[in-house]
Image (tube, rainbow, N blue to C red):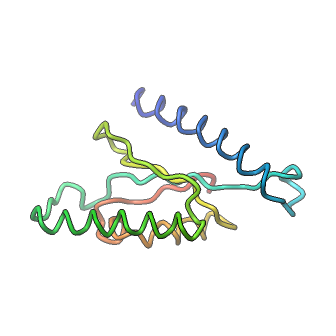
Amino acid sequence: MRQEAAVKSAVFAIVLLVSIVVSAQTPSHSPQIPKGMKQYFMGFLVKGEKWAQTPPKEELDQLMQKHLACIRSQAEAGKYALAGPFLDNGRIRGFLIVNAASAEEATQIVSGDPMVQSGRMAVEIIPR
């Protein structure tokens, strides 16, 4: 639990830094967000309900290739500003900085990931 909190704090610091850099380049139209800044959503890919159900290696390899292709596609489309895995084999498997207009849109974008659709991973979006 303590390690997970430390990881979340570190990721938050990274998100804040990336947000500052990216937001300096992106105009905002919201009165709640300072001029020159843009809101992003932090996404966590966590172990899903089917995580423990390990498919055959070939099937898992194919699913991983689809997952990575999805991440590349979303990054190229400008929807993911940053994405990466956590390698500690904990509950949180990866993180994403999502460029979306709302938490609902961010959830919808990340939910299209084949790992999420398979149930091996689930999505947590912050802020909600």
In this picture, residue 75 sits left or right of residue 51: right
The x, y position of residue 4, in whole percent, is 42, 34
In this picture, residue 56 sits left or right of residue 111: left
Residue 70 placement: quadrant: bottom left
Q: How many labels sit on residues? A: 0
Is residue 24 placed above or below 89 in the rendered structure?
below
Where's the N terminus, which quadrant? top left
The x, y position of residue 61, in whole percent, is 19, 63
Is residue 114 placed above or below 80 in the rendered structure?
below
Residue 72 placement: quadrant: bottom left
Q: Relative to the observer, which residue lies in front, 11 or 126?
A: 11
In this picture, residue 10 sits left or right of residue 64: right
Where's the C terminus, which quadrant? bottom right
For the view shown, which residue lies furthest in the left direction?
56
In this picture, residue 77 sits left or right of residue 25: left
Q: Relative to the observer, which residue lies in front, 41 or 50?
A: 41
The x, y position of residue 104, in whole percent, is 60, 68
Q: Relative to the observer, which residue lies in front, 88 or 119?
A: 88
Residue shown at 79%/49% (left/top)? 24
Residue shown at 55%/32% (left/top)? 9
The x, y position of residue 29, in whole percent, is 87, 63
Residue shown at 42%/26% (left/top)? 2
